[in-house]
Each structure stands twice: as C-alpha cells, then as structure tokens.
Image (cartoon, rainbow, N blue to C red):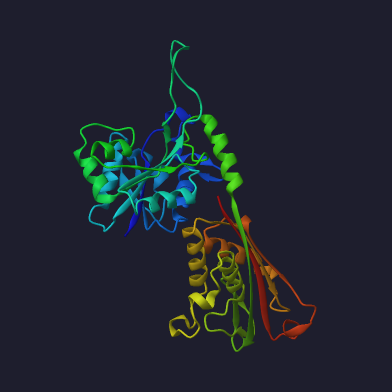
Amino acid sequence: MTTAALIVAAGRGERAGGGTPKQWRPLAGKRVIDHTIAHFRASDVVDSIVVVVSDGDRPHWETLEGVQLVTGGADRSGSVRNGLLALQGSGVTRVLIHDAARACVPVALINAVATALDAHPAAAPGLPVTDALWSGADNTVTGTQDRNGLFAAQTPQGFHFDAILSAHLAADHAAADDVELARAAGLPVAIVPGAADNLKITSPEDFDRANRILGAEMDIRTGTGFDVHRFGPGDHVTLCGVAVPHDRGLQGHSDADVGMHSVTDAIYGALAQGDIGRHFPPSDPQWKGADSAVFLRHAVEMATNAGYRISNIDCTLICEFPKIGPHAAVMQSRMAEIMGMSQDRVSVKATTSEKLGFTGRGEGIAAQAVATLVQP
C-alpha cells in the first residue's frame, strides 16, 4: 500500500487578512504551509506529498522542494480533483486530503487517519460539539439545536484512492469537503477522534493561537560530533570546505576534512542516525578522496526530510597549526553555503591544546561540533 498526502493550497484565504493568502504567510518562524508539509513529512505512513497551488502564487510556491506541484481548480472540489488526477496511475492506493491552513495538525492524527483506512474505505477526524448551539437572525437567538451526534469536521480526510477519485469524477456540484462527496457516492466514513489543536487558520486571531500551539510543540534536538585526522604528506589541509596552505596534508579515506566531518556527525547524532561511517562506509572505494560536502549535504537533506530545520552549528578546530583565524570567515561562508543556512547561524572557531597531546605535538588536527535542530 502506498499513501500520498494531498495538501490543498490554492485558496485565497481573504478572511485571514494580511493581503497574502494565509497559507503563504509567516507563522512561528516559517510559512503556514511549511509547517503543514513538515508534519506530513514527519509521518512514517506518508510516501509522497502533492501540493495543489494557484498559478497566481508562483513566487510563493516555486520555493517548495520535495513535493509534487499541481495547479488548482475553480473551487476546492476542483482543486482536489486536479490533485487526484495527477496521482492517477502512480500506484497510490490511499490518499490523505488536507487543508494547508491546518498547520498545527499532529503527526499522531495523520497516522490515526491512515490506520483507520485498514478497516474502512474512508476515515476523517471530527471533534464532538460540546457547546450549546443556537440558530439566529438579526443578532437575535431564534432557537436552539440539539448537539448530540454532531461533530466539527477536520482534515486530513483519508480515502482509498480509487474510491474517492470515482466520487469526485461522478460529482455534479462543489462540496464543502471530501467526506460530503464520499457519502454521496455511498462510501461509509469512519470518524477518528480529532485534535483540539488542529485548527484551520481562518481569521487574524487564529494566527496568534497557532503561534502558541507550534511554540509549545517545538521539538529541539542537539547532536555532537568529534573527529580526528593525522598529518601526512601534502601541501595543504582542507578544513570546513576551504583549502588552507600548509607544509603537510591530512590523511583520510575522503578529503579528510576534519571540521566538516564533525559537523556532519553532529547532525546525524541529533537525528539518532549514527555517523558518517554508517552512511558512507570507508570500505567502499567510491568515497576515496571524496569531497566531504557530499556527506554534509546528505546529513542536511536527512534533517530536512524529517521535518527539522538546522537552527545553528558551532564547530571548533583544535590544532597548533596552521593558523585558522585568517581563514575562519571563508570557512563560515562555505559551510553556510553547503547547508543552505545564513552565515550568522554557523560558527567556525579554533583553539589549541596548549602543546599537550597529539595536537600539541603537531601530529594532527581534531574538531568538535554541536548542531541544534528544531522541528515545530
């Protein structure tokens, strides 16, 4: 079974104000849709992500990576239909349809909806209505409504793919959500307990609430890395991606960039994904003499795919020589470039061991690093 997430992001969201459609507005350090996508990436049941967008929002969505982009329709139903048609023939058997404006969706809820599809052709989260319900006109209460058996609908709404595609193709009207079309096609829809924090950002006040929720849920991870390489023949050493002239080189299976190796291992460590040797075994000849940027980019990609943002990196080079100070700014710039980070979030500095130990005797260079990863 293959599960795709279909995120609807083609709407205008005018009630949220701000001029820019709400899905592209900033929220807790990222954009609304970036949070939404990150939650689905963090789910181990989602194999691929499709985002339905508006052509008019190109400056916003052209920066999205790792997702399939599909142009939306005239209304929500049309946008979902376009997304489903784009998935047709891809081997997807299940689809989770979600509103981009629900940026606080818990990963546990995504998984629960997907799990419900093991026993049902359709499933969706809902919250039992607990408040008293009134009918009204002209700002006056005209009656009451029994709330028993009523639920507030949420997304993601999950379906067996062929069934919901058929329901959309057979529909002759726009629907409030995909459950409405599924029921019109005769599909029973199981109710999964919803989450109170899974709000749909609709009004300006909702941004404040979403900021509070995402701040409370922030997952912060710290990893450390340590690496050592000995001196050998050569006329330069490569440190943090920069060739530094020296009367000796560093020995190693790759380019022996001790600084970049320590940073890479720090990121792997924060992800609980071992070290460079696990992902790029030194016994494999293809990595002989390899540019260590290959390893670092892989670690950064793993962090991004897991829904994490690298908040900052701190790398300390430990050696008596060569002198690091004249090259530190270039190293900082190069590391930031490789990781796609701003330079003010990357620290490269150096110290000596006061002529003690192997670094003090000039036998090699050591490096240690700390990486902080944040997942909202």
Q: Residue at x 67, y 80 (%)?
A: 365
Whether residue 78 is visible to the viewer of this picture, yes or no, is no
Height in image: 239 above or below 342? below
Q: Position of residue 160 (x, y in %)?
A: 29, 50
Rendered position, 376 above or below 130: below
Total label count?
Answer: 0
Asked whether, in this view, residue 169 is left or right of residue 214, the answer is left
Q: Nearer the viewer, residue 33 or 320?
A: 33
At x 44%, y 59%, the residue is 44
The one nearer the camera, 99 or 1, is 1
Side of 6 relative to 41 (left or right): left
Visible residue check, residue 350: yes
- Image quadrant where residue 248 sits: bottom right
State the image coordinates of residue 253 (x, y, percent, origin top left).
53, 84
Is 126 rendered above or below residue 256?
above
The residue shown at (30%, 40%) is 79
Q: Residue at x 56, y 61 (%)?
A: 336
Q: Quick check: 359 above or below 87?
A: below
Viewed as shown, does residue 139 lie left or right of 177? right
Residue furthest to the bottom in view is 233
Q: How far from the left and from the top, in percent, is residue 164?
A: 26, 45
- Check the picture and name the quadrant holding the N terminus: bottom left
